[in-house]
Amino acid sequence: MVRRAEMKDLNKNDDGQGGYDLIVLGAGSAGFSAAITGADAGKRVALVGHGTIGGTCVNVGCVPSKAMIRAAEAVHGAGAAKRFPGLSGHAQVDDWQTLVQSKDDLVETLRQKKYADLLPEYEDVDYIDAGPARLIEGGVTVGERTLKAPRTIIATGGRPVLPTIDGIEEIGALNSTSLLELEVLPKSLIFIGAGYIGAELAQMMSRMGVKVTLVARSHLLPGAEPEVSEALAAAFEAEGITLLTGLSYDTVRRDDAGVTLRVIQNGKPVEVTADHLVSTAGRRANTKDMGLDAIGVETDARGSIVVGEDMQTSVRGIYAAGDVTDRDQFVYMAAYGAKLAAKNAVLGEDHRYDNAAMPWVVFSDPQVAGVGLGEAQARDAGLDVKTSIVPLDQVPRALAARDTRGLIKLVADRKSDRLLGGQIIAPEGSDTIQTLVMALKFGMTTKALGETIFPYLTTVEGLKLAAQTFDMDVAKLSCCAG
């Protein structure tokens, strides 16, 4: 937490005569959100580019990965027709390069439409792309230019980083970006890191016909509930993905056979060889060489900017938002935080960052989604909790779809019956979670959720069943009897 009493005010005597009311560093989702908010408030804004306009999400993150995941689902879905008696199907990747090019075309279209083409619509926003920016007292330097403003918002995003493994710098490891730029579909891949990025991309490549080994120090989706993680691991293994978890990394090398990763599992060495190694083991904030130390902007051990609930840094007048901060690493939270930062910065308002009802989604299959507190988090917070779990084989939608992979878990306060959080692993979990978001946002109890009318034969009906499970055995209910 930033201690306000220790703040250094670099802009205290700045009268705003430097030409701008607000400088925004970074032209991704957070940067555009901040710049547009400032312009809508009638302020003159300098939007300083940092890398390709549009940032991570549209260029190398959400958009390209989800497009490829959908393509992989189409391939897998044809074969999955055999779940239904009397059906069969088959699909395969016929032209990898054409598929990759279609992904690139989509990215270019959205980057142009949702970012570049928006700039002329805001005459009070000057887009400046003249080289790396460095903070100084009362503004920034960009190339040979000096920009002045009483308020600055840093939204420079983050980048993939390699884990510390002997030899990894020499093997030409891929990351989430370069993986989707391969000109030739590989025969085999090793993924290091089993968080949401690793899980999504590993399954996607496996469904494209690649032999995939997913390696992690702990287990698949370490941030998810144990029951959810175990269910997804079972789904991955059923599709032929090899999971190596609970280990430590030793070395990695490249030779004529490909890339060989050596790990230590249960005290014994294990080696895995593949065409390429893909690192999805983490990201780091883009704060290097920005002059943060010189002006007193506090960062954490990973280089992320520490911000308070008002999105202000340890230096008064300098704010930060998005992946460059120590806050949630989701594009919608980046845009949300940047909007708060801009309103606080240029309008003198006092908006506070609130992620209590923040949904998150992993676009695996089945999808994983959650909101609020997990069981362990709630107990660590000193709460007396109760939980309920409904496997999908108790949800009519899943039975009709002949796909019962997954479950729904709810966490509630035992005394008040108020919902505290929940997680879903289901083929349509990403859309289902929003109903639970609203339930948490408005303080619903499990009883109220269980008494709410839901449409039959929907995945979201599983939330009602999970809520009823706190007090009854839903296996003994007839259809729609709740």
Image (cartoon, rainbow, N blue to C red):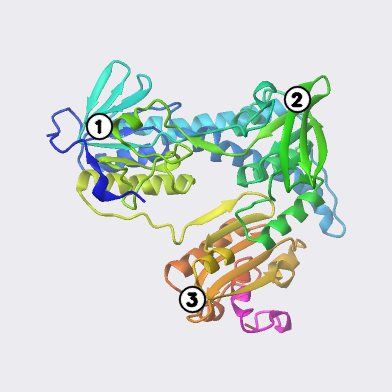
Residue 400 found in image quarter: bottom right
Q: Sequence-wise, which precedes: disc 3 or disc 2? A: 2
Residue 93 visible, this orientation: no
Say if mark 2 contacts mark 1, CB within 8 Å.
no
Please tell me whether mark 3 sits on a helix, a strand or a loop: loop
Q: Sequence-wise, which precedes: disc 1 or disc 3? A: 1
Is 308 situated left or right of 370 in this image?
A: left
Residue corresponding to mark 1:
123
Say if mark 1 contacts mark 3, CB within 8 Å.
no
Quick one: 303 or 280, which is closer to the camera? Answer: 303
> x and y percent of residue 449 in the render?
53, 76
Q: Which numbered disc covers residue 418?
A: 3
Identified by mark 1, the residue type is: Glu
Residue 58 visible, this orientation: yes
Point out the residue furthest to the front here: 267
Please tell me whether mark 1 sits on a helix, a strand or a loop: loop
Quadrant where the C terminus is found in the figure? bottom right
Please tell me whether mark 2 sits on a helix, a strand or a loop: strand
Q: Tell whether position 194 is magenta.
A: no
Looking at the image, which residue is at 31% across and 29% down?
Answer: 294
Looking at the image, which residue is at 65% across and 28% down?
Answer: 174
Residue corresponding to mark 2:
253
Instruction: Name the front one of labels 1 and 3.
Output: 3
How far separated are the C-alphas under marks 1 and 3? 48 Å
> x and y percent of residue 345 in the render?
24, 44
Q: Sequence-wise, which precedes: disc 2 or disc 1? A: 1
In the depicted structure, whether residue 14 falls above or below residue 141: below
Identified by mark 2, the residue type is: Arg
In the depicted structure, whether residue 432 falls above or below residue 411: above
> x and y percent of residue 445 in the render?
49, 77
Instruction: Name the front one of labels 2 and 1.
Output: 2
